[in-house]
Image: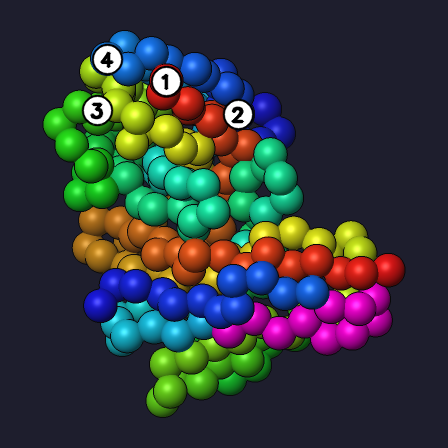
Amino acid sequence: QQQVKQSPQSLIVQKGGISIINCAYENTAFDYFPWYQQFPGKGPALLIAIRPDVSEKKEGRFTISFNKSAKQFSLHIMDSQPGDSATYFCAANLDMEYGNKLVFGAGTILRVKS
Amino acid sequence: GAGVSQSPRYKVAKRGQDVALRCDPISGHVSLFWYQQALGQGPEFLTYFQNEAQLDKSGLPSDRFFAERPEGSVSTLKIQRTQQEDSAVYLCASSLGRAGKGVNTEAFFGQGTRLTVV
């Protein structure tokens, strides 16, 4: 019940295209949904995040769409660029009385072809 | 420092050897987390500190894993009698806030320590 399922495993997009990555969860106690970008040899870096009371959040070329009833959320990268090639992780935050922890999806390897 | 610093970046250990991985969080950050990232997988939660108190160690895979943060800043993850299945990248993250109900602050990750057990 604490899993976050992410798809696809890998994605190839042409430069200028739209990259779409999807995630689904079961635990309704999750209260915050960040997306992380990870380049080889680096740690994950926060890209954009959303709370479940909002259906969409946009920051530059990155948009999160959130469907609370379906327990699904997705990342859209508009006008994808070769520099966007990285591994993307969705995550869900589980808040507890003493602290919190992030539950991550398995990741999507994005390659943007120039 | 400017970010979360982890050392060493790479560690090769012979099976059965003990290892210690260090994390220097961002100065002043209250919360500190350790995650384990297996090859091709997302990070998995290991343990959480609020200052020097280890409040959650539910993700530690066995009693061979031990973490400490004695003065509420630097943290060490120790793995005793390493096994091949311990091979992974160990990520440390810190956040400014006292993480808890209704409080979410961004977690900043270090570059990780890649542990290879041979």
The amino acid sitting under disc 4 is Gly
Can marks 2 and 1 be said to lie on one chain? yes
Q: Name the one closer to the observer, A12 or B3.
A: A12
**Which portion, as a residue range, is magenta?**
A13-22
Lateral position of residue A94 relative to residue A77, left or right = left
Q: Upstream in the sequence, badge 4 or badge 2? A: 2
Residue hosting label 4? B16
- Determine the main secondary structure of the stretch shown in magenta: strand
Residue hosting label 3? B66
Tag on residue B118? 1
Q: Dot 4: within a 10 Å radius of its alpha carbon, few (fewer than 14), some, or many (20 or more) residues?
A: some
Residue at 37% from the left image edge and 18% from the top image edge: B118
The image quadrant of residue A114 is: bottom right
Q: Upstream in the sequence, badge 1 or badge 3? A: 3
- Report how far apart the C-alphas of labels 4 and 2 lie in the structure: 26 Å
Q: Name the residue at the left extreme.
A: B63
Residue at 32% from the left image edge and 51% from the top image edge: A101
User: Is label 3 in a helix, a strand or a loop?
Assistant: strand
Tag on residue B5? 2
Which mark's residue is nearer the viewer, 3 or 2?
Answer: 3
Q: Upstream in the sequence, badge 3 or badge 2? A: 2
Which mark's residue is nearer the viewer, 4 or 3?
Answer: 4
Q: Dot 3: within a 10 Å radius of its alpha carbon, few (fewer than 14), some, or many (20 or more) residues?
A: some
- Report how far apart the C-alphas of labels 2 and 1 lie in the structure: 25 Å
